[in-house]
Image (spheres, rainbow, N blue to C red):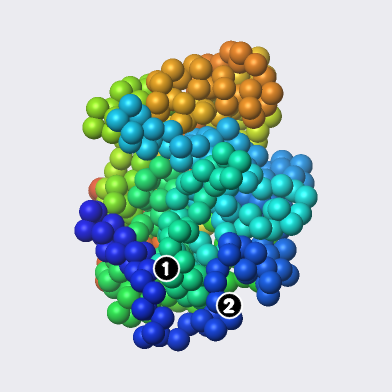
Amino acid sequence: MLRRLCVLAIGLLLVAGPALAGKKYSHQEYFEHYEDTATCLECHEDEAETFFHSQHYQWKAKAPNVVASHDQELGKINMINDFCTNPVPNWIEKVTNDEGKVLELGCSKCHAGLGKLPSTEMSREQLENIDCLICHASGYRRDLYEGDSGELVWKPILWKNREGIDSVSKRISLPTKVMCLRCHAGSGGGPNFKRGDIEYYLTEADYDFDVHMDVDGNDMQCIDCHAGADHKIPGPGADIAGDEMPEKQVRCDNGDCHGSAPHEKALLNTHAQRVFCTSCHIPSFAKEDPTNMTRDWSAGHWDEAKGKFTYTGTFGSDVTPVFHWWNGEQVTMQLSGEPVKTNATGEVMVSVPVGSKDDPESKIFAFKLYKAVMPVLKDKRWLLPIQTGDFYKHGDMGESVRIATEQYYGIKDAEFEWMPTIHYMGLFHEVTPAYSALRCLDCHGPDTRLDWADLGYTGDPLAQIFQPSH
């Protein structure tokens, strides 16, 4: 993993001014000096306005596929998740331990803004808060600094180096894999912690790792599949609430790339009618960096190596997916300010796909199954956030929950209890070649990876077909 991160870091650190001499960039002659976002707005104010309204800036969007969403705009900004919980009480901060090691920078680290919380009302201040370079400039890096009024702001690390920032700011392009993975591979607190199938290694993937992003083959970029318009991006997956382009679904089998009968063998095409492509073509995930599989916030402890208090969690490498019916659209998600909804085993359903074998529109999809333990308000039964930076530094979980609950809900001295959560996360990346896909006996053999009972069967349906009658 260290080698992979070093390769990525080297790519991001190529910021020397002479680079412009060897390659012609689209914005090389458009301006002399970069003066923050105001420079971009001179030509691109219309684009900034579309980005202001996008899910990447607002962190919420209409959620037509979330069951009982009440026509709300939903997203990480106004929902509680079971990773870093919620951005509002964790937006921007620089928490250090006694040795000066940075423990937490806040959720805005992965927001395409310069530090201000997004507002629903557009203003010049909000437009100038947009960080265009984080998605469009090759080699751009930023860090937290103190602003003129003492507030924390995100600035380019070269903000005092006129030649350096002028060089980087002119390397403008459509978003590349490296740019997207800055945030999407590091979400949840570390490399591949959250998604499991979106790793930094995709920037240098070979054919066996990912047939689509293979750097010596298709070398596809994220926007090849997630191509939208006006800064709207299609493809929310199975556990992202907001969907700003519901009319444009990103699917393997919709005919854009592969049809509903992609195989030469009829038997495989028959399977494809009820088994989604990735169920066979992603035999495992977290192939390079381990991924977080469980996170128990109730069991905090001091981690000597990290120099902080932390949750108790487990990680997995080369993990076998779990399988669940999904109709490709609807999900049950836990909304903020509503009593928790639990499954038959008492787990809070943070995100559970809707579907069944009796629904002809449903297929068996591959998922990362993530479980956590989260605080729940005793009287109202609401899922609660945690002020993670405060916990990492001081280790008082009760106080960290109460601080976050007051900031988010306005409830002081909250009394809470702990409940388990369940979270299905769709797997759609790191697709392997056909020769690495699952074979018949992987599912229809003695060591099947499928839980037939959980899928609604009394046993392997193939075995029942060939079972001798009595």
Tag 2: residue type? Phe
- Mark 1 lies on residue: 164
For image coordinates 68% across by 75% down, the residue present is 43
Q: Position of residue 357 (x, y in %)?
A: 54, 50
Q: Is residue 467 above or below residue 174?
A: above
Left or right side of 452 for 382: right
Q: Mark on residue 190?
A: none
Q: Is residue 379 above or below residue 334?
A: above
Q: Is residue 42 above or below residue 143?
A: below
Is any part of residue 323 visible from this angle?
Answer: no
Q: Position of residue 217 (x, y in %)?
A: 33, 80
Q: Earlier in the sequence, mark 1 or mark 2?
A: 2
Looking at the rendering, in which quadrant would you find the N terminus? bottom left
Q: Nearer the viewer, residue 335 or 28?
A: 28
Left or right side of 439 for 342: right
For image coordinates 37% across by 22% down, the residue present is 300
**How much space separates mark 1 and mark 2, taking CA atoms?**
14 Å
Tag 1: residue type? Gly
> In which image quadrant can residue 234 be found?
bottom right
For image coordinates 55% across by 68% down, the residue present is 34
Check disc 2 and report its element: helix, strand or loop.
loop
Check disc 1 and report its element: helix, strand or loop.
helix
Q: Position of residue 99 (x, y in %)?
A: 30, 30
Left or right side of 383 for 6: left
Left or right side of 206 for 127: right
Q: Is residue 394 above or below residue 194?
A: above
- Mark 2 lies on residue: 31
Tell me the crowding category of disc 2: few under 14, some 14 to 19, or many 20 or more residues within 10 angstroms, Cα based.
Answer: some
Is any part of residue 388 visible from this angle?
Answer: yes
Q: Position of residue 189 (x, y in %)?
A: 41, 42
